[in-house]
Image (cartoon, helix red, strand yellow):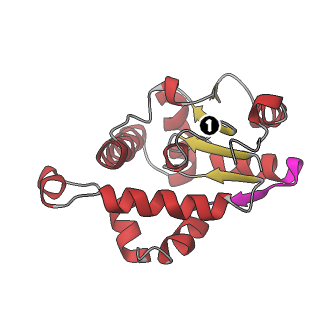
Amino acid sequence: MPIITIYRGAFTGGEEVAQYVAQTLDYRCVGREELVEASRGYGITAVKLNEILEREPHWWEHWLQNLRPYRIALQAAMCSVAREGNIVYHGHVGHELLPGIRHVLKVLLTAPLEFRIENVRSQQGLDEAGARRYIDHVDRARTRRLTALFGSDWRDPTRYDLVLNLAQMSLEAARHIIVEVARLGQYQSTAASV
C-alpha cells in the first residue's frame, strides 16, 4: 500500500504531476475533496475544514481555539483514505498527516519566485507586482496554517524525501523521477509500516 504525498508551492503544477504519477503507477489520485469527505466521518464539516485549511488565521484565533482536535481528525481522515492503499495525494497538508509511516514518499515541488511569478502572470493575468503579492499572500497563509496545525514550516526541505525544482526540469522529468523513487524498496509497505 504505497503512499505518495506531493506538496507544491503556489503555481508549480503539482496536481498535474500527481495525476501522471498515479496513472503511471496505477494508483488512485487523491486530493482535497477526498480528504473533506473522509473528514466528515470525524465530525469536521466541509465549512470547518475550509476555515482551518484555507483561511489565513489571526494570532487571536490561535489563542482562542485549540486546533489539536482538528489535526487529529484530519490525520484520522487521511489514514482512512490511505488505508485503501496505492494513493498519490496532492495537497497542502498531506506530508504532515501521516507522521512516522515509513513507506510514505513525501515530495515537495518547488521553483524560484521568478518562475512562479511568470506562472501566476500567465494563469491569472496579473502584472508582476500583483503576481508577487498574490504568491506572497498564499505562501504566508500556508505557512501560518501549517505552523498552527503541526508546528512545522512547509519550506523546510528536511520534512520531505524528495525536493524537485521545477524551474530546472520539465514536468515530465519530475513525473518520471517521482515514479522511479516510488518504486524503490524503501517506499514499499511492510507488515510493520502498514
Q: Which residues are magenta?
A: 23-31
Q: Residue 125: give x, y in percent of width and height.
A: 50, 52
Q: Nearer the viewer, residue 173 or 67?
A: 67
Helix or strand or loop: what does disc 1 sit on?
Answer: strand
Q: Nearer the viewer, residue 16 or 158?
A: 158
What residue sits 52% from the left and 36% below the top? Answer: 116
Q: Residue 190: give x, y in percent of width and height.
A: 77, 41
What residue sits 61% from the left and 41% below the top? Answer: 101
Q: Is residue 154 left or right of residue 122?
A: left
**Residue 73 versus residue 110 in the image, above or below:** below
What residue sits 32% from the left and 39% below the top? Answer: 151
Q: Residue 94: give x, y in percent of width and height.
A: 55, 49
The stretch drawn in magenta includes residue 24: yes
Most extreme residue toward the front is 192
**Residue 169 versus residue 107 in the image, above or below:** above
The residue labelled by disc 1 is: 106
Q: How many residues crowd around disc 1 within 10 Å: few (fewer than 14), some, or many (20 or more)? A: many
Q: Nearer the viewer, residue 116 or 21?
A: 21
**Tag count:** 1
**Which image quadrant for residue 186?**
top right
What residue sits 56% from the left and 59% below the top? Answer: 78
**Which image quadrant for residue 52?**
bottom left
Q: Is residue 136 left or right of residue 99?
A: left
**Residue 62 versus residue 179 in the image, above or below:** below
Q: Residue 93: give x, y in percent of width and height.
A: 49, 49
The stretch drawn in magenta includes residue 19: no
Q: Nearer the viewer, residue 165 or 113?
A: 165
Q: Which amino acid type is shown beneath numbered disc 1? A: Lys
